[in-house]
Image: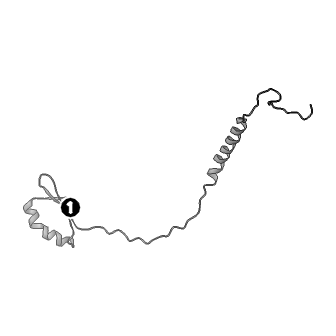
Amino acid sequence: MIGGRLGGGPETGLPVRAEINVTSLVDVAFTLLVIFMITAPILQGGVEVAVPRAPSAPLQVAEGLMITVDRDGQIYVDDDAFTRDEFAATIVQMVERKGGPTVYV
């Protein structure tokens, strides 16, 4: 019979083969995956952006007296130890000598 059917069917009594060949589909999927993995790092060049520069003011050094009191009641002024009586007698002179009223406790 010329031009006959190649697959099965109800006329021939053979079962119908209606499945998709998955091997070709997997080959194409892996090929596309490899192509994207190779080209993705190349395309990450990005766009040049001119970031505006703002003038920055220099940091001002905080000058003043640093007063620290420990648990025992010992008073330190800029790493110098004082008793309560010595501290009360000299604190006003120290503030005037440093040139400013800034005191950090």
Q: Residue 91's spot in the image, x, y percent?
A: 13, 67
Nearer to us in this view, 4 or 101: 4
Q: Nearer the viewer, residue 94 or 40?
A: 40
Is residue 5 shown left or right of residue 79? Answer: right
Residue 83, quarter of the rendered image: bottom left
Give the quadrant of the N terminus: top right
Query: Neighbour class for label 1 at 10 Å: few (<14), some, many (≥20)?
Result: few
Which part of the image, by quadrant, shows the C terminus?
Answer: bottom left
Residue at image coords 20%, 61%:
78
In the rendered image, the residue lying farthest to the front is: 11
Left/right placement of residue 26 relative to residue 83 reads right
Residue that appears at 21% across and 72% down: 100
The outermost residue toward the left is 85
Q: Residue at x 8, y 60 (%)?
A: 84
Q: Amino acid at mark 1?
A: Asp
Q: Position of residue 80 (x, y in %)?
A: 17, 59
70 to 9, vertically: above or below: below
Tag 1 residue? 78
